[in-house]
Image (cartoon, rainbow, N blue to C red):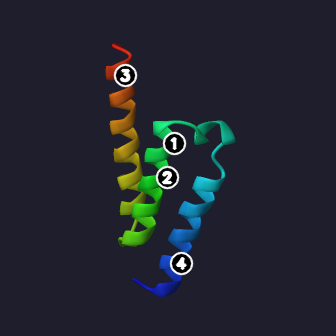
Amino acid sequence: MKPKLQITHRLALLALFLASPASLHAGAVADWNTITVQAVVAAARPGPTGALDVATVQAAVYDAVQAIKNR
């Protein structure tokens, strides 16, 4: 992958993270979001796999919250 494309992916993930509302920055859900974004940026995987990684973690967090709330 070209270095310029890697920088573009990192900037896109950073913009996505910074665009999230401030109310999301409280609690375990926001902590997992932060950890996921940092891991995806650090891994610098090729193509759109970073977005898929974030989506997978968010789905797992959603399932965990629903399990705790007994829904």
Q: Position of residue 36 (x, y in %)?
A: 42, 54
Q: Which residue lies under the disc numbered 2?
A: 34
Q: Earlier in the sequence, mark 4 or mark 2?
A: 4
Quadrant hosting residue 26: top right
Query: What's the mark number on residue 7?
Result: 4
- Foreground mark, 4 or 3, reads 3
Q: CA distance from mark 2 to mark 3?
A: 20 Å
Quadrant hosting residue 35: bottom left
Give the class, few, some or many, for how many residues have Cα within 10 Å of label 2's Cα (few <14, many ≥20).
some
- Foreground mark, 2 or 3, reads 2
Q: Decide which of 61, 3 is in the foreground and name it.
A: 61
Q: Which residue lies under the disc numbered 1?
A: 30
Q: Position of residue 18 (x, y in %)?
A: 64, 55
Q: CA distance from mark 1 to mark 2?
A: 6 Å
Q: Secondary structure at mark 2?
A: helix
Q: Secondary structure at mark 3?
A: helix
Q: Which residue lies under the disc numbered 3?
A: 66
Locate residue 20 relative to residue 9 in the image: left or right: right
Locate residue 4 relative to residue 21 in the image: left or right: left
